[in-house]
Amino acid sequence: METLHPTTVQILTFILGAACLHGLWLGIVIILKNHRDTNHWLLGTALLAISFYLLNYVLFLTGIILVYPHLLGVLFPSVWLIGPCLYFFTKKNNTLNFHWKYDHLIHLVPLVIAFVSVLPLLKASKEKKLAIIEWLMNPGESFTWADILQGNNYLYLLIVYIGTALWTISPTRQKVNNPATAIRPGWLPGFLKIFMLILLFDLAVKFSFFALRIPAFTLEFFLAAVLAISIHFAGYQLIERFDQFSKRLPFNLNEKYKTSPLTAAQIKTYSLRLEALLDHEKPYLDAQLKVAELAAMLEIPSHQLSQILNEGMQTNFNDLINHYRITEIKQRLLSPAFSHYSILAIAFDCGFQNKTTFNRVFKKLTGKTPSEFTKNQTV
């Protein structure tokens, strides 16, 4: 291996070692904060996989791999988990009605292939492993374009996954059907873009240095250090987000729903979708509308709709429907197209079933009786 200055080795070892420990700690913390939530598992597993990826560099940088050659290849398969985990974390949090399907298991195929391909290496003798390690550290002229192209397969796939994740949360993709249902992904696009730039920079440097026949093995450590520093920064940002997430929501989680499978992000997503449904399809005009029917339109159980109303919108079914009905009535009372209708006829047409209830709800929400409201508009 190309000789590095002892001080450089110490600095790189500290950066990479600290990043590994930090990533492992952060991944475990995120998973343990809510081990029933797949969001935590996906993000935590991605961070653990990145940490194992960096740990492999630490083994070579410190020479530990020469003392324990049986560790060669042990950490390699984990790198194939990074892409799928980040992709599904993004998709699950930014897709309405996301459901896990059996065909999603196809994303584990690269991991299985990587594990199978590394088995012969794991079974190899100590002498053969040491020879491979020596070649990796000093590839020399025997290192060909085929080697460098094949050796970066995991980077190609990771770039595809990150690119697809970014496309999933792009404004164009989010607003194809209705801007009201667009999800605000917050910090995630920036995180993914930075990660993508690091991966592309890594590939560009590897290909450029190889084309120019510049010794670039030690450069791997510097590129890994860039990734390590980025993980440090992102890690603190992420742990801050998870610690303060509930504080930033416009509602407090109720102990009543402590065992609910719905995450805060899903509650927010369904709240946006419910608002869009009420605005465009106006199911509240049906006087017989029930909670179960509205839940069926959202394709969720009734008890989950109640949770979304209580926690996500700080209301209940009756108050929400009455709010939309009164808003519709006010619009019709001000519209010339409905001038030949009586106030009560409009109220019945908007879902109210008796005059007493209508008058009470109208006064409660507007501070005026229906007659006072129409009188003030004509003055």
Image (cartoon, grey):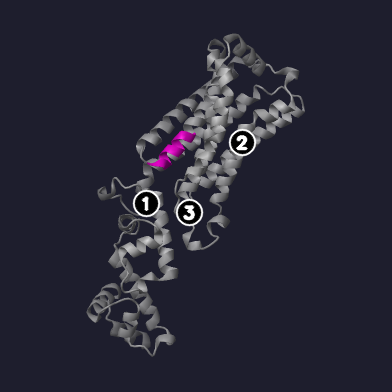
Q: Which residue is mark 2?
A: 199
Q: Is residue 287 visible?
A: yes
In the rendered image, which quarter is residue 202 located in? top right
Q: Residue at x 63, y 36 (%)?
A: 156
Circles 1 and 2: CB atoms closer than 8 Å: no
Dominant SS of magenta comes to helix
Instruction: Find the distance from the CA under tag 1 to the CA under tag 3.
Output: 13 Å
As drawn, which residue projects farthest toward the left? 356
Q: Amino acid at mark 2?
A: Leu
Which amino acid, by three-letter code, is at mark 3? Arg
Q: Is residue 179 left or right of residue 283?
A: right
Tell me which numbered mark, 3 or 2, is placed earlier along the sequence.
3
Q: Which residue is mark 1?
A: 249
Q: Nearer the viewer, residue 292 or 102?
A: 102
Question: How far apart are the two marked residues, 1 and 2, measured between alpha carbons?
Answer: 33 Å
Label whose residue precedes the other's in the sequence (1 or 2): 2
* Rendered location of residue 181, percent (x, y): 47, 60
Residue placed under numbered mark 3 in the picture: 184
Mark 1 falls on what kind of element? loop
Q: Residue at x 37, y 51 (%)?
A: 249
Label 3 SS: loop
> Was residue 271 drawn as part of the magenta stretch in this picture?
no
Q: Which amino acid is tagged 1?
A: Leu
Magenta segment, which residues? Answer: 37-46
| First of labels 1, 3 by sequence position | 3
The image quadrant where one finds the C terminus is bottom left
Q: Position of residue 277 (x, y in %)?
A: 42, 65
- Label 1 crowd (10 A; few <14 / some 14-19 / many >=20): some
Locate residue 319, reporting x and y percent.
29, 67
